Structure formats: C-alpha cells, structure tokens
Image (cartoon, grey):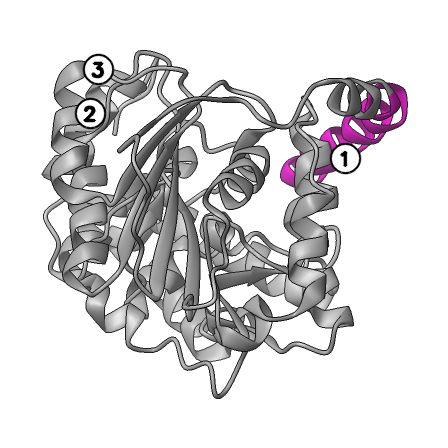
Amino acid sequence: MVRRLKTLIRSLLSAVAWWSLAPLAVVAGRLRRRGQIVRCWPQAEIVLGPRVVLFMHFDRHGNVRRQLLDYIRAFRENGRDVVFVTNSGRLAVEAEAALRELCAAVVIRRNAGYDFGAWADVLDRLGLPRAETQELILANDSLFGPLVPLGDVLRRLNYAKADVWGLTESWQLRYHLQSYFLAFGPAALRTEGFTKFWRAVRPVPMKSYVIKRYEVGLTQAMTKLGLKCAALWPYEMLTAMVGRDELAQLLAEEETLIGKADPAQTMRKEQALYIRESVAQRLPLNPTSDLWRQLLLSGFPFIKRELLRDNPSDVLDVGDWCEVLREALGADPEPIRQDLRLMLKGKAP
C-alpha cells in the first residue's frame, strides 16, 4: 500500500510538472539550435560499414567506465562499427585514447536534449542511415554489463521477424521499446517516417518530455507506419515467470524456521506479490526495475545502473543482486561493486 501511495504521489507530481513546465521546455527546445557538436574524430570523412551503433554516454568529468569499453569492444567483435557520442562536452585524454582504439568515430557534444537530442544530432551530421546501412543500433551507458557474451544477444536480432527490436518493452505511459537499446533493420531504415521522426526531434531540456514524446513516441511512430516492433525479452514472458508455482514456493519457504527469520526471503515474497497484484490489476511495471530478477534468470545481459544506485521505484528484493548474478549468469559482481563504490551515497551494495 505504501509503495502504491508513493507511486501515486510521484504520478501526481509528474503531471503537475508536465502541464506547468512542458510548454516552457518546448519553447526552449525550439529556440536552441539542434547542432550541439563540439568536435568529431576523425576530422576526415567517417567511414562506416553496414551495421552501425550510436553509443550514447554522459559523465560530467569526461571519464569512461571500464565496463563501457568492454561493451563497445563486444559490439566491435560482433561486426558493428561504433560511433561513440558523449554529451559531456569533453573527454578525459586517457578515455578518448582508449575509445579511438575501439570506435569508428568519437563525437563530443554539449549536453542538450538528452540521448534523443544527441542521436538526432549525430544522425544528421553523419548522414545516417546511408545507402549501405542495413542495421542501426542505438545504445547508451545506463547499464552495468554485458554480463554474458553480447554476441548471443545480437544473433537473436532477426529482421525477418520484426523491423525494430528492443531488449525489453514497457507499457508505462503507452507501449514502447525501452530506449537503452534499440535496433532498426532495413525496412525501418528505408521508411520515410524514420527520417521524419528524427528531423522533428528538438533538444528539449526536460527529461519527462523526452521520454513521453521521443522514447514512447518512437515506438508509436514506427508502429503507425506498419512496422513490427518486438522485444527479445517480452513483458508477458517475464511476468509469467512469477506464477502461482513461484509464489507457492516462496510462501512455503517463508514458513520454514530460516524463512521466518530471513528478511531477504520476506522481501522476495513481497516483491512477487506486488508483481502478481500489478498483473491482476493490469497496472504496468517497469521491466528493468520491477522484473530485474526475472530478466537475469532468463539470461538478460545487463542490470540497470539506476536500480542499484537509486532504486527510484522502491523495488523490494534487489538486496541479493550479487547472488543472482553469480547463480543465474555465472557473472562476477566485482566490476559493478567497483563502480558502486564511487556512486552510492548512504547505501551499501
């Protein structure tokens, strides 16, 4: 009940902010010029192959985490040309040197318009999609991972089955593929509506506007064009993992002597009940937060940084994430712990 009340309060505050601030943000976005690129490397013509990744980054100090370099390296090893785009306005010397070893291009721009403003800016500057472009992936640095080989995920992107792929899908606000990883195949890239959408993106300085109009709006626009959008980890598959059998097992374990004394067991049960209640009431969940455990158990290669750093939606059972990483994926949680040592304030991992 407390969690529902917090969610309701956040929704009301968000609605007030939307109606009071969105009109001003839109005006600011229209007044600000779209081109916010400071410089590009290389300065000569940027040569790209048929499969391109635009990788979005932000760090106020211009640093790049080691895990991001591993992520980019995984793209490169699987035949993708990576264009690294930072909204930091600068890059540390060592970071840029490391990126030049891995990327086809490095783009430094001012922090205007969040991810979508940056993607729109770079698509225009590089003339993407080009005639030879067969796949375009939009990715960002909001994740820890990959925790399993990325090639296993990329091989599942079948453009004969869907034109646009995300890793996860959300029904919050309206149906959409979550924008931390979006992959567009040939049919989507050749559609006039794809170019039209990106030309209309403005550097609006309001995150909720960007989410509603651009993140949600992109999937809605592609769907209206008759393109098929799909997720590699479908929403219904994840919620179905928390079925009666799972709940019965959790309840049975709670009745044991250890279960009665174990707060972690209680949190797992409460989170499972929250998921079941939400499904029963047709209330949308955020897959990368509320269903993080189900994602990892089904081989998902990432965990959201926001979940471990802030846990903004008060997910109850995230305390044993290290154990789940080790048992479900055979992954070492230490690299994530190293980042959390710099990120967490007043919390333990």
Report the residue that reaches farthest toward the bottom: 160
The spot of residue 24 in percent (x, y) is 84, 18
User: Where is mark 2, residue-wise?
Assistant: 96
- The alpha-carbon separation of the residues under discs 3 and 1 comes to 38 Å
The x and y percentages for residue 99 are: 18, 34
Q: Residue at 13% across / 26% down in the picture?
A: 97
Q: Quadrant of the N terminus?
A: top right
Q: Amino acid at mark 2?
A: Glu
**Crowding at mark 1 (Cα within 10 Å: few <14, some 14-19, many 20+):** few
Question: Of 179 and 83, which appears nearest the observer?
Answer: 83
Which of the 4 image quarters holds residue 91? top left
Q: Position of residue 172 (x, y in %)?
A: 69, 53
- Badge 3 local density, few (<14 within 10 Å), some, or many (20+)? few
In this rendering, the answer to whether 18 lies above or below 342 is: below
Which residue appears at 65% of the width and 48% of the height? 198
* Residue bearing the label numbered 3: 92
Q: Is residue 346 above or below residue 273?
A: above
Whichever of callouts 3 and 1 sits on the residue coming sooner in the sequence is 1
Q: Which residues are magenta?
A: 2-23
Which of these two is toward me, 242 or 235? 235
The residue that appears at 27% across and 54% down in the rendered structure is: 81
Residue type indicated by callout 3: Ala
- Do tag 2 and tag 3 residues touch (Cβ < 8 Å)? yes
- Could you give the CA–CA distance between mark 2 and mark 1, rounded to whole angstroms? 40 Å
Q: State which mark lies toward you, 2 or 1.
A: 2
> What main secondary structure does the magenta stretch of the protein show?
helix
- 329 or 106, nearer to the observer: 106
Say which quarter of the image contains residue 7: top right
Residue 321 appears in the rendering: yes
Q: Earlier in the sequence, mark 2 or mark 1?
A: 1
